[in-house]
Image: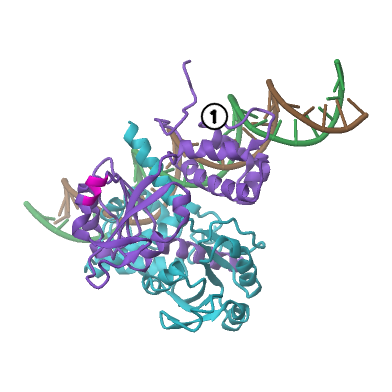
Chain colours: A purple, B cyan, C green, D brown
Amino acid sequence: MPDKTPRNCDALAKVPEATILRLPVYLNRLKALRARGVVQISSRELAEPMNIKAGQMRHDFHYFGNFSRPGRPYEVEVLIKRLSEIMCLGNSTPYVIAGAGLLGQAIANYSRFEDDGFNLRGIFDINPRILGMTVHDLPIRHMEEMPAFLSSEGIHIGAIAVPPSAAQDICDQMVAGGVRGIWNFALVDLSAPEGVVVQDEFLSVGLMALNYKVKAGMRE
Amino acid sequence: MPDKTPRNCDALAKVPEATILRLPVYLNRLKALRARGVVQISSRELAEPMNIKAGQMRHDFHYFGNFSRPGRPYEVEVLIKRLSEIMCLGNSTPYVIAGAGLLGQAIANYSRFEDDGFNLRGIFDINPRILGMTVHDLPIRHMEEMPAFLSSEGIHIGAIAVPPSAAQDICDQMVAGGVRGIWNFALVDLSAPEGVVVQDEFLSVGLMALNYKVKAGMRE
DNA sequence: GCTCACTTGTTAGCGGCTTAACAGGTTCTA
DNA sequence: TAGAACCTGTTAAGCCGCTAACAAGTGAGC
């Protein structure tokens, strides 16, 4: 049995989607705790305020291994480092935004992404009135420049914050520019070639689900 | 056996969370199809472009019943009506936004929510420079006015788009004002009393998960 | 040095979601 | 009218993820 614990973001075929979505949540909370000066923490103290069972978190960690030694509590700094490794956040990851409307600008100025290792390199639009204006220290460029920009800068991640009608076209252009992962805020189902990951961020889904739960809860 | 099919947003104890999150997705696509003039559609044509198995969608519908008659394809209009009923989107649902920064304004101006039956009633902030300015035809009010506003208008849903450090306080104020559902964009784990639903919308989770999948895919 | 209270790592069992298959109904064509 | 090609509603099987329990390790107090 050579080495059963996958260390980094290598392979690890069988890590459940649900776990992958929890890792960033752990990381966020750990950073908040570090900012408060917390050095050590038990799995229960870490997990339960997030409404996650301590055992489940330990189980999640167990897919990767090397988080602590048995018997000892976790060290906040070690966990942050380990999770960052696992999620490949070590080296700054460049990305761009298509669409410089309110949503695009909100994303661009959400500084938290930079603390997490992402680096906004460009923002694109087609509205001639705002071209050249500055968002987050970057000029708004014309969408036509995007594919060449992407390939010359070697960027693999792009956010789509344009109206639904334009989204598929932007998606195609991003793929042509070499993008491998698309963060999609437009309310359409994009079709992308095999190997390109599309992460939908449909805000209205969250709002409707919330509404459903509230209304359902009020009937009980 | 009295009536095994739950009709509206009544009770329906056993509808899985995963199903609840898919219903809005179906609804969005159906509205897009209606806009294109589609009247009838089969489960396969409806589901597969969303990367959802047709059988699963029929199974989701089956929790509620009365979507079509066996043998016949679905009628787009009927499905929209039925899903809207189930999700209690019939009567316009009022809500407010706390935080009039870029993100708050982006949410306020995202007109899609109104098509889905939500009605923005107020937006609040503490920054004196922007108080009184108009966002989406509404004046930015001071946060102090919020609790009274909520209860006098009978509002049960509030979005939090303020910095993490202020979020818990805003959450408490919303609860005091009678809010039953909180749409939380601030990257902290809010604690709310039993009966209040908190729907987290942590954007960085999506970005990190996307990055993970891209990096993991590039190693294979 | 010993015990106790605490911790994490690990594995097995259970429950719930997804999947697939089938039964029953409709429509169209010949 | 009979048959074929669809379609949805429904049920059962399979699988994946969650839960819980346990083993093993640590450190404090005495």
Q: Which residues are magenta?
A: A149-153
**Label 1 crowd (10 A; few <14 / some 14-19 / many >=20):** some
**Residue in view at x 23 percent, y 57 percent:** A170
> Would residue B134 appear left or right of A27 to someone viewing this image?
left
A131 up-or-down from A94: above or below: below
The percent position of residue A218, horizontal first and vertical second, equals: 59, 68
**Camera sees residue A51:** no
The percent position of residue A118, horizontal first and vertical second, equals: 41, 49
> Would residue B38 appear left or right of A138 to someone viewing this image?
left
The percent position of residue B81, horizontal first and vertical second, equals: 37, 70
Count of marks, rendered view:
1
Element type at marker 1? loop
**Camera sees residue A159:** yes
- Which residue corresponds to mark 1? A65
Subunit of label 1: A
B115 up-or-down from D18: above or below: below
Residue A151 sits inside the magenta stretch: yes
The percent position of residue D26, horizontal first and vertical second, equals: 72, 26
Residue B180 sits inside the magenta stretch: no
Seen from the viewer's position, the closer of residues B182 and A218 is: B182
Q: Quadrant of the C terminus of chain A?
A: bottom right
Seen from the viewer's position, the closer of residues A103 and A141 is: A141
The type of residue carrying mark 1 is: Gly
Seen from the viewer's position, the closer of residues A73 and A220 is: A73
A4 up-or-down from C14: above or below: above
